[in-house]
Every structure is written in structure tokens, then in C-alpha cells.
Amino acid sequence: MGKTIALAAPTGRAAQRLSEMTGLEAKTIHRLLEFDPKTMGFKRDNTNPLPYTAIITDEASMLDLFLAHSLVKAVALGAQLLLVGDIDQLPSVGPGKVLADLINCLKVPVVKLTQVFRQAKLSAIVTAAHQINQGDYPNIEPISDNPVSDCLWHGGGHEPEHGVQAICELISEFIPRLGFNPACDVQVLCPMSRGLVGTRNLNMVLQGLINPPSSDKAEIAKGGMTLRVGDRVIQQTNDYDREVFNGDLGTISGIDTEEQEVTVDYGGRPVVYDYADLNEITLAWSISVHKSQGSEYPVVIMPLYMQHYMMLSRNLFYTGLTRARKLAIVVGSKKAISLAVRTTNDQQRYTRLWQRLLQPN
């Protein structure tokens, strides 16, 4: 159509995924708007708009009011803005529900996609996701030695310690038997970081299972955590100097004990951290469902236990389950699954945006 296109997403991981899918460069919204750490503001705004005639933003459900305002302000007059997202996923961490308000005000042209491309058409993951969205207990196949669907449930006992044991057995025996490699194909997604089936404990357990200590692997203990070559890690902050952003996943490719440096490979791009900056990264064998938004993985294991009852919700369950491309395994009690399906409190966000949009100009 002769338009100059910019592709963007709220997180580094989502931007990377968008780039992989389109074959074009995609940036985080912060990078697109040229965030300036000195002023803690954006260089692009209504006085210095973006030089594009079409701007496409993926994972728009993650946009909070502040970031959406900054983005819209920087769109040049006459340019088009296309927002792509799923309002059934987790809402933005910051205030507002921008995408939902824009859709519900009926003032903006909306196209709803009905065909699923991530999983196969007859995928049980898709069926379960629809059931969860409708508030129905999902029809998930109980795990067995010969599963017939791509969405499985492992009872894993009522106690979290049974869940940890079940996840270990899945990763060491069941998943390799199905032809998947736990080191690169599997992502464990948790509702919270705390507790036995939280990300912190599971990261230590899974590290020992998938990437155990070895004489030929350098390692370093930092902040109550051991990092070793071969570990999967996640960036926890936006680092504009290194050009790595919150949510980026990488693998530790080298540890230099003399220079006191750790090298992390982010999709073929090596990034070097001084020991002093290692608080920016943490182990990512297990991450929170919130951190997984905008990503997809061949295999997802999702523990759901009453230990995390505060965080269990329909959005969280739906978001975590739909990150899986080929296989999803829910580990946990029926009580916790049922609570997650019934809970929709986190959708109650009080905003003025849709009312403002309905007001005559």
C-alpha cells in the first residue's frame, strides 16, 4: 500500500516474536519512542512524531494508560495505528484497560480473528482455552503413558510438594519420551514466585535436574542463587545500554571468573554483564505467567495449587495455557483449577477512557 511501517510491542520478548513472524524489524515501544534514561521520558511525541505512516503494535492488552498515551501522542497526523491483542489475557500491570476500552466504546473499527494458528485446528489446548473463557471447567485429558491430545492434566496430589515431584518426573521421564528436549522446549509457568510451586523454588529444583553442576561448567553464586553455563535466564529490567529488555529470555554461554563477567546469548546476540550487574537477570527454567505474555513455547507445564489462591484467575489460567504451541500440561488440584476458572475479579478495573471516547468532540 506504499506505507512506511513500524512494528512494536510492549516487551522485548513480544517484539522478538513479532520480528520472527514478519521477517521485519520490531522494537519495544520504549525503543520505538526513543526512551531517554536521562530525562526518563520519550524523545518522540506530538512535537517530534514518528516518521511512519503505519504503526502496528502487538500484544496491546499489555498497554497501560501511560504507555498508550505516549504512543498515541507520537503518531503523526494522517498515520494509521493498528493495535493487535487479546483482551481475555492478563490485563496490563499498570493502570487502565486500554485495548478493552477501545473495543467496547464502539468508536474504533474492530476486527475479531476467529481462526487459531498457534496450535492445530483440532487442538485440545484451543478447546480448553474457550471453555476457560466461558467460565466452564475445561475438559482436559488425564495424563497417561499414551496421551491422545495436546492438553493434559496431572493430578499431582493436593499438596505442593507432590506437585514439585510430579513436575520433576514429567521433565526427566515423560516429556523426553514424547520427543521434546527439556533444556530448550519446556517452560514452567507459575502464578507466583513464592512457595514450593513458585518460580523461585522450582528454578533451583529444575536447574539441578536440567543443568546440574559439572566440572566443565563454570558457575557463580550471586544473591542466594547459582548461575552456571547453560542456564536459561530472564532479563528483569529495561537496560538501554545493553539493549536488553524486561522479559527477554537468554542462555548463559560463558562465565569469566578472572574478568568477572557473565555472557548471555539472546537469540544469537551475546550480551556481557559485569558481576555487579547480575541482579538484572535471574534463572528462567520457571517464570511467572505475567512474564510469559507475548511468548510461546513448544511445551508448557503449569502448576495450579491453592497455595497461590490469591493469584488464581480465569485470565491467568487462559494466558498460561495458550502459551503452549504443541503440548500443555496442567499440574494441580481440581479445586485450584475450579477456583481459577470461576475467578474474574481482576477484570474489574475502573477507567474513564471508554466514557471519554463516547463524548462528542
Image (cartoon, helix red, strand yellow):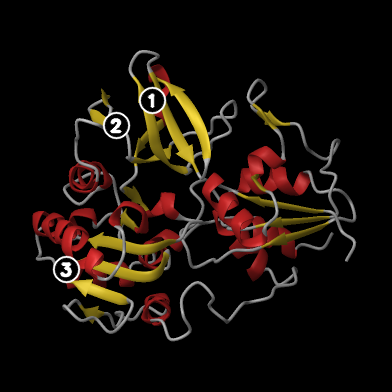
Quadrant housing the C terminus: bottom right
Label 2 close to label 3 by CB (< 8 Å): no
Instruction: Pinpoint residue 145: horizontal percent, then vertical percent.
Output: 16, 78
Q: Which amino acid lies under the numbered mark 2 shown in the image of this protein?
A: Leu
Query: Looking at the rendered structure, which numbered label has been put on residue 333?
Result: 3
Q: Is residue 218 above or below residue 162?
A: above
**Left or right relative to 92: residue 213:** left
| Label 2 or label 1, whichever comes before in sequence order | 2
Q: Which amino acid lies under the numbered mark 3 shown in the image of this protein?
A: Ser
| Label 3 or label 1, whichever comes before in sequence order | 1
Does residue 260 show up? Answer: yes
Q: Is residue 39 above or below residue 9?
A: above
- Label 2 crowding class (10 Å Cα cut-off): few <14, some 14-19, many 20+? many
Query: Looking at the rendered structure, which numbered label has been put on residue 278?
Result: 1
Instruction: Pinpoint residue 350: horizontal percent, then vertical percent.
Output: 53, 56
Foreground mark, 3 or 1, reads: 1
- Label 3 crowding class (10 Å Cα cut-off): few <14, some 14-19, many 20+? many
Query: Looking at the rendered structure, which numbered label has been put on residue 129?
Result: none
Q: Residue at x 85, y 44 (%)?
A: 51
Q: Residue furthest front?
A: 216
Quadrant housing the N terminus: bottom right
Q: Which amino acid lies under the numbered mark 1 shown in the image of this protein?
A: Leu
Foreground mark, 2 or 3, reads: 2
Q: Is residue 234 above or below residue 118?
A: above
Q: Residue at x 27, y 46 (%)?
A: 199
Q: Is residue 152 above or below residue 91?
A: below
Give the Cα distance between marks 2 and 1.
10 Å
**Mark 1 residue element:** helix
Label 2 close to label 1 by CB (< 8 Å): yes
| Res 300 → quadrant | bottom left
